Image (spheres, helix red, strand yellow):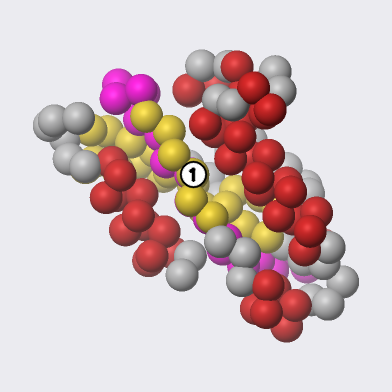
């Protein structure tokens, strides 16, 4: 991928109690239509999540994020949505939800190296 690429990214968040609207950032999903690129990075810090709320089902959270990753990558195990084209998968992943896993609104950016950019955003906003 040479040259600069317009991209969009969203932060993946866990809301232990949706009604309180408090969240912990756990991942990033970044996509570029022109570059035909989509990538998701996530990390569940179980100790941090448990200190935030002891009621979370961490195995369920991890399985849900794994499903998001399969959809993002277009794996067959991701079901019908994983077979959508890249922009549709990104829009599905970033759709407004009222569940304990949500995403921020998509934000635009411009970068030469999309892999480096998603890793940079992951370090800045999640780790």
Q: Is residue 34 visible?
A: yes
Which one is in front, 102 or 42? 42
Q: Is residue 52 visible?
A: no
Say left or right for 78 vs 20. left
In this view, 64 is above or below 55: above
Q: Is residue 100 above or below residue 92?
A: below
**Residue 29 is a magenta residue:** yes
Q: Quadrant of residue 89?
A: top right
**Element carrying mark 1:** strand
What is the residue that sits farthest to the right in this orientation?
A: 55
Horizontal and vertical percent position of residue 117: 29, 49
Residue 93 drawn at (x, y percent): 60, 36
Question: Residue drawn 75% across and 77% down?
Answer: 50
Q: Nearer the viewer, residue 5 or 58?
A: 58
Residue found at x 68% / y 72%: 46
- Give the class, few, some or many, for how many residues have Cα within 10 Å of label 1's Cα (few <14, many ≥20): many
Q: Residue at x 33, y 36 (%)?
A: 7
User: Horizontal and vertical percent for residue 78?
Assistant: 67, 28
Coordinates of residue 101 in the picture (x, y in percent): 70, 52
* Quarter of the figure with the N terminus: top left
Q: Which residue is mark 1?
A: 40
Q: Is residue 15 above or below residue 11?
A: below
Residue 23 shown left or right of residue 91 in the figure? right
- Nearer to me, 29 or 58: 58
Magenta region, residue range: 20-36
Q: Residue at x 37, y 66 (%)?
A: 124
Answer left or right for 110 relative to 78. Answer: left
Q: Judge whether 78 appears above or below 16 on screen.
A: above
What is the residue that sits farthest to the bottom in this orientation?
A: 51
């Amino acid at each position: 991928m040479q040259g600069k690429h317009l991209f969009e990214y969203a932060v993946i968040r866990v809301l232990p109690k949706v009604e309180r609207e408090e969240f912990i950032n756990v991942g990033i999903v970044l996509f570029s239509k022109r570059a035909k690129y989509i990538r998701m990075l996530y990390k569940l810090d179980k100790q941090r999540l448990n200190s935030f709320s002891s009621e979370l089902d961490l195995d369920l959270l991890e399985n849900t994020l794994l499903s998001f990753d399969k959809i993002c990558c277009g794996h067959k195990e991701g079901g019908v949505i994983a077979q959508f084209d890249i922009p549709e998968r990104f829009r599905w992943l970033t759709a407004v939800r009222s569940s304990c896993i949500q995403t921020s609104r998509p934000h635009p950016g411009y970068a030469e190296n999309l892999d480096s950019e998603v890793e940079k955003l992951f370090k800045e906003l999640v780790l």
